[in-house]
Each structure stands twice: as structure tokens, then as C-alpha cells.
Image (spheres, helix red, strand yellow):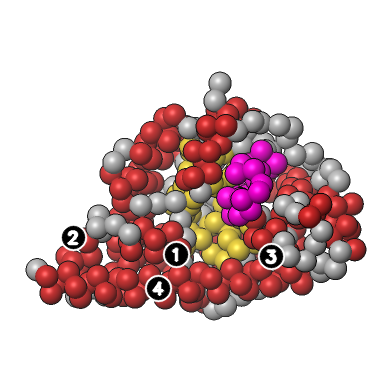
Amino acid sequence: MSATQQLHNLGQSLWLDNITRDLLTGGTLQRYIDELSVTGLTSNPTIFHQAIKNSQSYDSSIQEKFKNGKEGEELFFEVALEDITQAADLFRPVWDRTDGVDGWVSLEVSPLLAYDTESTLAAAKDLHARAGRPNVLIKIPGTKEGLPAIEEATFAGIPVNVTLLFSSEHYVAAAEAYLRGVERRIEAGLNPAVGSVASLFISRWDRAIVDDVPETLHNRLGIAIGQKAYKAYLDLINSPRWQRALNFGARPQRLLWASTGSKDPNASDVLYITSLASPFTVNTMPEQTLKAFADHGDLGDALPADGGDCETLLNDFTQAGVDNQALAARLQEEGAESFVKSWNELMEVITTKSESLVQAD
């Protein structure tokens, strides 16, 4: 049995953290679904920037939309929705088979809105309506300003992927925002089964402190943060508050491991896959990491429900001078800035391609 099948059988969902038009039209994504147990997909501004910049597959669509008066952000979302809806259709059988637990595809609102609650909510409603697929998650950042938008979007019945979470505290705040939305739906007599995942970023922790801690602590902080968040996740969904919501027909928001490609050439290229194996969670993997795990992955022990030795390990990092709370805040801010940078670069590519394609016509 393949490593990806073993992980799937453990109860963890394997999602692909990538989207390109060639991936969709060339049959590669369908092959990943059929052969590598891939059951969902995530995208972000950086992924779309690379996809559109490095491929001619989008040129005719960009050219046509630009001729019809579309430009910039408006043009991009029309192009992105073509990819997202095609991917959603490929995963629809998974979504149907699992009754909406799995088979999701994620599209992010503009990262320029990360600190604007009302505009984030409006964008989430607009994108979900335009996608017209029940298995599309709208990504909303778990910033302080994003939390009310997550609650309101959930109350409105919009499936949400909460992104840019970096700690168990970030996770709990996001999960409680989702739960408030669910509880309000129960009170209003609405169906509380609104899909959602909460995305905890892992590898950026280790990259951030690699020069500040002893070598014995390299590539261990992200996993410890994950262990602590996993315990918080299980504690929350097993709490009386969540049990009550489940009794009314709600479904738990699943914890998703994001940023799981190894950044250290001296570390295993599947470190964050084997170390975060855990049932009823999602691991969204870069394409290279997915193929590496399929090729030589070795499934070890599942994450301990009690967090294992994470508190001891986190204390070791504290002793080494790492302020985890301050670093989590910094990483979230840097993550938002990174997506804004990619977004601005993406808009430049859209503009440049639009103009050059029309001139060449």
C-alpha cells in the first residue's frame, strides 16, 4: 500500500497546495486524485502569481476578458474562478461521497483586505456566489479583523478556510469565531452544517528561528506548535459547547496543516507530513512534497491527542530566547505582507499580459 493511501486510511485528508491550468487540463490533478489519494486543493495569491506568470495557458482567457473591458483584480478573479470551478468539479465526487466532509477547493479573498472586516465579508459573499459550487471554501485570514468576518460568513452559510494561523491561540480564536456563527445559525433555525477548515502554518516557524537556536532545536518548533494546536483542537471539539452544536447537526471545523513543505535542505523533505499524521485533520502539501511522500514516505506514529512532549519542547525554545507569542504575531503579520506582495506582483503580471496580448493580436 502506498504511503499516501496509508495516510488517507489513517483518516487524514491529503490536499494539494497548488493550482495551474495545465494541472487541470492535462489530467495531472485527476491522476493525483486517482493514484495519490488527493481529496482537495488549496490556492493562494502566490500560487496564482506563479501559475499565470509562468504559463501561456491563461493568455487567451486574459486576452478575451481584457477586450471585454475587464482588468486588474476583476479580470484576475474571473480567470481564477475558471480554475477553481474546474477543480471543484473534479473533487465533486469526493464531496458527494463524504457528504461534504472532504472534496473542497479554496479561493482566497484579496489579501489587501486582511485588516478590513466589512470588505472581507462582502468579498467572501461575492466570490462564493460567483463560484456557484457547494464545495468551494473562501479563504479569510485569521487576523483580529478577519475574525468577525469569519463569524458573519459562517452565519451566512459560506464555507470558510481560515488562513494565516500560527499558534494554538490563533487557532482557538478562529475556531470560536466559526462556532459563534454556527450557534447563531442554530438559534435562527438554519442548517448549522457549514463546511470549514482552520489552517495552521507550520514550516515558517522553523525558518524564522533557524539562526537563533542551537542545531539540536532545528526543525522542531513547527511540529511542537502543531502538537499544541492539535490538543487544543481535540479539547474544543470534545467540549460540551461543541457537543451541543453537533447534536443540532453542526459539523466540526477541521484543523488543517499548511506550509508543510520542508525549507531546510538538511531536513527530510517529508518531515511535516510524517510528523503531523493525525486523523480528522487535513495536510495541504506543495506538489513537490506530495510526490516525495508518495515516492519514499514512511508513515510513523500518529500525533498524540494530549500534545505529547510539546510543552517541554516549547519550554526549551523559551530557554533559548524564543518568545512564541511574539513570534506568532510577527509571522502572521509577515504572512499577510507576503500575500500582499504576491498580490501586487500578480496584478502587475495581469496588466502586462493584458496589454501585450492585445497589442500582439
State which mark lies toward you, 4 or 3.
3
Q: Is residue 243 above or below residue 68?
A: above
In contact (CB < 8 Å): disc 2 and disc 1: no
How far apart marks 4 and 3 lie (CA) works out to 24 Å
Q: Quadrant of residue 60?
A: bottom left
- Mark 2 is surrounded, within 10 Å at the Cα level, by few (under 14), some (14 to 19) or many (20 or more) other residues, namely few
Which numbered marker is on residue 60? 2
Mainly helix, strand or loop, the magenta region?
loop
Q: Amino acid at mark 2?
A: Ser
Which residue range is magenta in the image? 251-276
Q: Is residue 325 left or right of residue 283?
A: right
Q: Amino acid at mark 1?
A: Pro
66 and 186: which is toward the camera: 66
Assess whether residue 263 is covered by the magenta stretch: yes
Q: Which residue is mark 4?
A: 345
Q: Position of residue 238 (x, y in %)?
A: 77, 44
- The structure residue drawn at horizontal position 38% and vertical position 40%, both measured from the top left corner, is 29
Q: Is residue 229 above or below residue 299?
A: below
State which mark lies toward you, 3 or 2.
3
